[in-house]
Image (cartoon, helix red, strand yellow):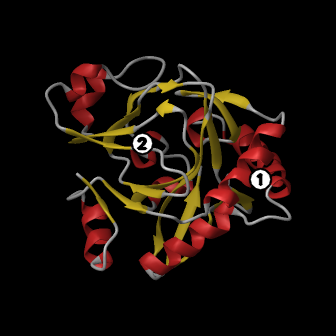
Amino acid sequence: MSILLSQHKNSQINDLISGNISAIEISNVLSKSACALLCEKITKRNSISSGPGLTAKIGTSLSSHIYDKASYFSNAHNTNQFIQKLFSNTLSPIDKIHQILEQLFQKKISTATENGMKYSDCIIRIHKNGDSVHIHRDNCNFEMPEYTVSKYRNQLSAILYLQPPQSGGELKIYNKQWSKTDESLRQPDFGYSCNVVDGIDYTKISPTVGNLVLLNPSFYHKIESVRGKKHRISIGFFFAESSENNLCCWS
């Protein structure tokens, strides 16, 4: 179940962490005009590459470097610099998301570091006509034990929608959390067999411009097929509790 953020935000945050709810949606985090300006800057850049489960991205993801730390941190350094320049002279969506999270969780947030090396600040996802993302879940505690972030508690995900497609592209969240026994249904390339959520209820969240979604990524989820010439553009990262008073984020 996903819900809109209400005046009972503290209990909702606890429910998100515990898995009583799968996601929280926060409306109008950025204006349409601010999102349009950011999308114009993003689509004019030529540093778009491919990645697991998606067609195009700007940024570096940990899931692409599970067994190659050196390459991950090298790429993270380069893409962080690129994205910082990309968002210069305009409102940084990363800063805006950080502000929201600090208010909600009453904790300071910063990008995770390891041995003096900085993790990737975020990833910008660009889904074009016909693109979709197969059923998957995200759990660095299980999959990435060699990275410091795998030791942090209560991993969540933040996704800010900058541009919706003409149609489609909904985030479909199934009311089922991952368990280790599900690994028998894992697919070699990416994600899981549809059988892992057979008969399970789900919620759909439309990629509404300017809205922020906080997701408990242990719930199985997918992105429905995008339709039309208008790209689905979002920016996001994972975050977790690195200490009692601090959150760390990464992508």
Quarter of the rendering containing residue 153: bottom left
Looking at the picture, which amino acid does disc 1 mark?
A: Asn
Residue lying at the far left of the rendered structure: 199
Residue 203 in view (yes/no): yes
Q: Which residue is mark 2?
A: 138
Query: Are circles 2 and 1 on residues that touch, CB within 8 Å?
Result: no
**For residue 151, above or below residue 60:** below
**For residue 52, above or below residue 66:** above
Query: Residue 28 at what x, y percent from top left?
Result: 51, 64
Query: Residue 74 at what x, y percent from top left?
Result: 78, 44
Q: Residue at 53% across / 23% down in the picture? A: 131
Residue 114 in view (yes/no): no
Query: Residue 105 at what x, y percent from top left?
Result: 43, 77
Quarter of the rendering containing residue 90: bottom right
Looking at the picture, which amino acid does disc 2 mark?
A: Asp
Residue 234 relative to residue 167: left or right: right
Viewer-proximal residue among 18 and 85: 85
Q: Determine which of the numbered discs, if any, sits on residue 167 in the image.
A: none
Mark 2 neighbour density, 10 Å: few (under 14) some (14–19) many (20 or more): many
Assign a secondary structure to mark 1.
helix
Assign a secondary structure to mark 2.
loop
Q: Residue at 59% across / 64% down in the picture? A: 30
Q: Residue at 78% across / 52% down in the picture? A: 83
Viewer-proximal residue among 199 and 165: 165
Query: Residue 95 at what x, y percent from top left?
Result: 66, 68
**For residue 176, above or below residue 118:** above
- Mark-to-mark CA distance, 2 and 1: 22 Å
Q: Determine which of the numbered discs, if any, sits on residue 80 in the image.
A: 1
Quarter of the rendering containing residue 54: top right
Q: Residue at 69% across / 60% down in the picture? A: 34
Mark 2 / mark 1, whichever is N-terminal: 1
